[in-house]
Image (spheres, rainbow, N blue to C red):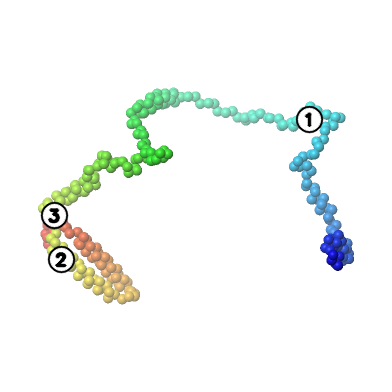
């Protein structure tokens, strides 16, 4: 046996004593004079038995039985609508309208549709290929498994654009054989290219002599003239180098002398 007889369980039975400060302060809580009005306004909008209904439905009073048409609401009387003016009369059908009607109805659309279907070609069924035992399938047309290109109508034929190009080339060749046109010799073509290159160097050297800051109108006009000349010479050189065979007029020398 322990000498100490104190246990925790003995302390649980004793209630805590309220301090004097709490008892004195509870008497001095603030209470508004409008508390009753607030509660009254709060409970004003509440409805009794709104969700579940009354617990016990009151039975009707036998001293006040139901009367005939007691809950009937009288609707307003329906006033008929009366027009203030008369409607215009229905127009009569003219003879021209009858003729047009007869002309339109003379066509038999049923027979026309039947003849159209008879003369039309039947729709080819779509061809499929089953790929596995489960029945999955795909279209054979356009899949690459069938040779479609060989069976085309234009297979093995020369394309239309090549035939037209051949005809144009033959026409140009025939025109070149005439006496009115002669081919430019290659030596003269090379001499023209060299002369244009020399002229390009001279104009470019003159262009480089211009000042950086152009102040007068004459200097600005000279610069524009030189740039245009350089562009034209470059275009002519490219044209002569690109085309190896050139045709000129036969009487070119006579025109030059005149």
Mark in front: 2 vs 3: 2
Residue sitting nearer the eye, 207 or 122: 122
Q: CA distance from mark 1 to mark 3?
A: 119 Å
Residue sitting nearer the eye, 96 or 51: 51
Q: Quadrant of residue 75?
A: top right
Image disc number at residue 191? 2
Above/below status of 248 relative to 160: below
Tell me: 190 left or right of 30.
left
Question: At numbered mark 3, what does the secondary structure look like: helix, strand or loop?
Answer: strand
Label whose residue precedes the other's in the sequence (2 or 1): 1
Q: Which residue is mark 1?
A: 70
Q: Which x, y percent locates residue 20?
A: 88, 66
Mark in front: 1 vs 3: 1
Q: Would residue 51 be visible to someone looking at this image?
A: yes
Q: Residue at x 78, y 44 (%)?
A: 47
Where the N terminus falls, by quadrant? bottom right
Q: Which residue is mark 3?
A: 181
Q: Residue at x 22, y 69 (%)?
A: 200
Q: Would residue 25 be visible to someone looking at this image?
A: no
Q: Residues within 10 Å of mark 1 (few under 14, many from 20)?
A: few
Q: Residue at x 27, y 74 (%)?
A: 208
Q: Are marks 1 and 3 in contact (CB under 8 Å)?
A: no
Question: At numbered mark 1, what does the secondary structure look like: helix, strand or loop?
Answer: loop
Label whose residue precedes the other's in the sequence (1 or 3): 1
Task: List the single residue furthest toward the front.
Answer: 1
Q: Which x, y percent locates residue 164?
A: 22, 46
Q: Residue at x 12, y 52 (%)?
A: 177
Mark in front: 2 vs 1: 1
């Amino acid at each position: 046996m322990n000498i100490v007889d104190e246990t925790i369980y003995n302390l649980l039975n004793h209630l805590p004593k309220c301090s004097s400060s709490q008892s004195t302060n509870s008497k001095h809580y603030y209470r508004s004079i409008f508390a009753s009005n607030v509660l009254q306004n709060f409970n004003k909008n509440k409805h009794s038995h709104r969700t579940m209904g009354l617990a016990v439905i009151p039975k009707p009073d036998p001293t006040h039985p139901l009367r005939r048409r007691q809950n009937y609401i009288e609707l307003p009387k329906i006033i008929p609508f009366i027009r203030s003016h008369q409607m215009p009369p229905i127009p009569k059908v003219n003879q021209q309208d009858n003729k047009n009607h007869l002309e339109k109805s003379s066509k038999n659309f049923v027979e026309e549709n039947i003849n159209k279907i008879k003369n039309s070609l039947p729709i080819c069924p779509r061809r499929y290929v089953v790929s596995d035992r489960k029945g999955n399938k795909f279209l054979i047309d356009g899949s690459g498994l069938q040779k479609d290109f060989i069976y085309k109508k234009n297979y093995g034929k020369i394309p239309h654009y090549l035939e037209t190009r051949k005809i144009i080339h033959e026409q140009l060749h025939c025109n070149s054989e005439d006496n009115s046109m002669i081919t430019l010799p290659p030596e003269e073509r090379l001499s023209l290219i060299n002369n244009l290159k020399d002229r390009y160097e001279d104009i470019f050297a003159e262009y480089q002599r211009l000042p950086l800051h152009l102040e007068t109108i004459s200097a600005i006009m000279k610069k524009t003239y030189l740039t245009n000349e350089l562009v034209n010479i470059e275009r002519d050189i490219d044209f002569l180098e690109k085309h190896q065979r050139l045709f000129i007029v036969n009487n070119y020398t006579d025109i030059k002398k005149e």
